[in-house]
Amino acid sequence: MHDSVAPVMKQKLKKPTASSFHSFKVETEKLKKDKTGRVRMSVRMKTDDHLLLKLLAAHSRKSSQLIIEDALREYALKHGDKILPATCNCMTSKAFT
């Protein structure tokens, strides 16, 4: 583990409150969205990963976006409970699904 990461992980995590959830929702609503409600972001990846993504998209007839969204959901379901503290119910909450 990197030395710069260790102090952050040792901090006592605060239990989410209704006000922190509300402020998160308020900040989320401020984000610029397209007409379908999605937020734009950029992703940097290796050329080999980009090629793999494009090949998967072409062969599956799915968009690259859909493949990445599916992969993110799968990752969250598989690893979310190990990454987030038990006091945080944001992964199990229906508010973010």
Image (cartoon, rainbow, N blue to C red):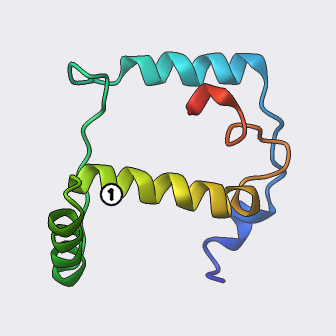
Q: In this view, does 94 lie above or below 19?
A: below
Quarter of image, res 14:
top right
Q: In this view, does 16 lie above or below 66?
A: above
Residue drawn at (24%, 71%) of the image: 45
The amino acid type of the residue labelled 1 equals Ile
| Rendered location of residue 42, percent (x, y) | 23, 52
Residue drawn at (43%, 53%) of the image: 70
Quarter of the picture holding the N terminus? bottom right
Residue drawn at (47%, 55%) of the image: 72
Q: Nearer the viewer, residue 77 or 41?
A: 77
Quarter of the picture holding the C terminus? top right
Q: In this view, does 63 lie above or below 33?
A: below
Q: In this view, does 75 lie above or below 23?
A: below
Residue 87 appears left or right of 72: right
Tag 1, which secondary structure? helix
Quarter of image, res 62:
bottom left
Residue 67 appears left or right of 21: left
| Rendered location of residue 61, percent (x, y) | 19, 57
Q: Nearer the viewer, residue 63 or 12?
A: 63
Total labels drawn: 1
Residue 8 appears left or right of 69: right
Return the residue at label 1. 67
Q: Residue furthest front?
A: 60
| Rendered location of residue 4, percent (x, y) | 60, 73
Quarter of image, res 82:
bottom right
| Rendered location of residue 25, percent (x, y) | 55, 20
Q: Nearer the viewer, residue 23 or 97?
A: 97
